[in-house]
Amino acid sequence: HCKKLAPTWEKMAELAEKDGLKNQVAELDCTTNAGKPMCAQFGVSGFPKMKMLFADGDSVGHVEFAGSRTMDQMFSFLKNTDKPDPTKDKVKLQLRKVAPPPSSGPSNVKAIESASGLQGLLEKGPLFVKF
């Protein structure tokens, strides 16, 4: 499912950048040593799981995407989701030092490789993350 969704995810990131959206598109690999604990914190057990993440001090609020995996529905969620779900517990990030956000390279999809990288990206705006 993740590989099938990859071209659509990349295209959505390109559209978000082109449209100048504050909300960003990112992905987090839950199979890496750095990714496993963050995925567990966000309650991710099946893949792909998609959530919009919002910075809230040293915590992260979130909204889970529940629509169909079409470009139209995902892009609408990306554009129109502007606050976390108040019924969901916020995730507390345990950080001592914030690293700069990782480079996206040739892709517009931001790669989250650490908790400090996640926080750095969230400082720029909300993230629509594919786990």
Image (cartoon, helix red, strand yellow):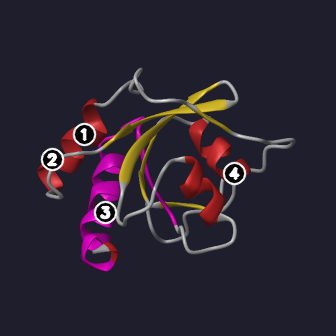
Q: Residue at x 80, y 42 (%)?
A: 95
**First-in-chain label (3 vs 1):** 3
Q: Mark 3 and 1 residues: CB-CB less than 8 Å, in contact?
A: no
**First-in-chain label (4 vs 1):** 1
Q: Secondary structure at mark 3?
A: helix
Q: Mark 1 and 2 residues: CB-CB less than 8 Å, in contact?
A: yes
Q: Residue at x 27, y 72 (%)?
A: 7
Q: Mark 4 and 1 residues: CB-CB less than 8 Å, in contact?
A: no
Q: Position of residue 114 (x, y in %)?
A: 69, 58
- Judge whether 53 appears above or below 101 on screen: above
Question: How much space separates mark 2 and mark 3, taking CA atoms?
Answer: 12 Å
Q: Position of residue 44 (x, y in %)?
A: 46, 56
- Judge whether 62 appears above or below 2 on screen: above
**First-in-chain label (2 vs 3):** 3
Residue on which the image places disc 1: 77
Quadrant (top left, top right, bottom left, bottom right) of the C terminus: bottom left
**First-in-chain label (4 vs 3):** 3
Label 2 crowd (10 A; few <14 / some 14-19 / many >=20): few
Amino acid type indicated by mark 2: Gln
Amino acid type indicated by mark 3: Trp
Residue on which the image places disc 2: 73
Q: Position of residue 55 (x, y in %)?
A: 57, 31
Residue on which the image places disc 4: 115
Q: Which residues are magenta?
A: 3-28
Q: Is residue 16 magenta?
A: yes
| Secondary structure mostly taken by the magenta-highlighted segment of the chain | helix
